[in-house]
Amino acid sequence: MNTLAARRTRNLGMTVVAALLILWLSDVMTTALQDTSRMSGWGLLAMIGFLAAYNLRKKLALLPLGSSASWLQLHIYIALLTAVVFGVHLNWKMPNGLVESILALLYLLVFASGVVGLFLSRSLAKRLTTRGEEVLFERIPVYRKRIQAEVEAIVFSGLEESESTAVAQFYADRLREFFLQTRNFWQHLVQSNRFRFGLLKEMQAYGRYLDESERAMMTRLVTCVEAKDDLDYQFSLQATLKYWLFIHVPLTYALLVFAALHLLLVSAFSGGVS
Ligand code: HEM
């Protein structure tokens, strides 16, 4: 077993042991007719506060607060542990009150978005290396415009050199829109090549009606279609990797606001937070 796998197994093992300890403690307290909600509530708040602090840690990257990789590992295992504390705090039932229901829903959404984000960041990062050149996200529009300019140059030179407008017609009908902006976001995300293969097949079939110089032009256009499609693939995966945090982080802030509101309500109705 390599060291990374060994570390993961050890961390996961520790998380499971901590989860079992929490469940055991809650069981003991319930049997002794002691209230678990206060302890689990403060515990959950502290854990969520730590998870939310990851955002600050990223903003204060220059301060010596430990490596980002260690924070991420801690983030994931403590986040998994919150699920058990959350269950204990709610006594494994959805709450009835409005604020509490919204709070529980927000927690579940933050948790789910974290799990989805973790899956995406692991799987998409791997897939990014499998197709096209890895490009800087911010440079993608520049590369797209470059390919579009090349395509237009091929089509216009064809119009100047030959009487036939067949290639230009095909470009106007089938390719212009494709080169104009990023396409097939969702298809790339689910790894579907249907559009690419369909278009390339269409271009091959169209080539049968062209003369030799036009066919040479079509071959150059095919290379451009492949390059643009690879660029769209990079965009789709990189944008998803970048923007899933725009769901996870704002939901975290909403969760903190509702947690504060919940605390206020509880302290108002129980005569003070002790
Ligand atoms: C339940 C409460 C949770 C809270 C309050 C929370 C909060 C946060 C915050 C504030 C960030 C920092 C984002 C940034 O500034 O870039 C973050 C990142 C992240 N979280 Fe969570 N999270 C929670 C649960 C989870 C769960 C359950 C998982 C997965 C099992 C998870 C996985 C991640 C990952 C992978 C990142 C991004 C790491 C990176 O790209 O550097 N989170 N989370």
Image (cartoon, grey):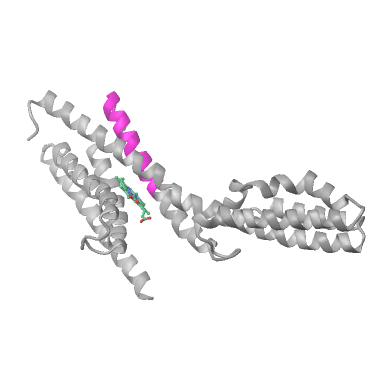
Label the magenta part by its dominant secondary structure: helix
In which quadrant is the N terminus drawn? bottom left
Along the horizontal axis of the image, is 104 left or right of 133?
left
Q: Position of residue 96 (x, y in %)?
A: 29, 25
Q: Which segment did they paint magenta?
A: 95-114
Residue 205 in sight here: no
Indicate whether residue 97 is drawn in magenta.
yes
Where is residue 91 shown, x and y percent of the image?
A: 25, 37
What count of labels does the image hold? 0
As rendered, which of 199 and 259 lies closer to the eye? 199
Vertical order, 179 against 94 (above or below): below
Q: Is residue 4 above or below residue 242?
A: below
- Residue 149 is a magenta residue: no
- The x, y position of residue 81, in whole percent, is 27, 51
Give the residue drawn at x 17%, y 37%: 37
Q: Quadrant of residue 18?
A: bottom left
Q: Residue at coordinates 14% horizontally, 46% vertically from top-left?
A: 28
Q: Nearer the viewer, residue 67 or 177?
A: 177
Q: Nearer the viewer, residue 95 or 238?
A: 238
User: Which residue does the image show at 38% across and 48% down from the upper left?
Assistant: 114
Classify residue 68 as left or right of residue 36.
right
- Pick whichever, 215 or 92, lies toward us: 215
- Residue at the extreme bottom of the image, as rendered: 2
Relative placement, left or right, of 241 versus 22 is right
Q: Is residue 87 visible?
A: yes
Q: In which quadrant will I find the C terminus?
A: top left
- Residue 166 placed where, x, y %? 88, 50
Q: Residue furthest front?
A: 160
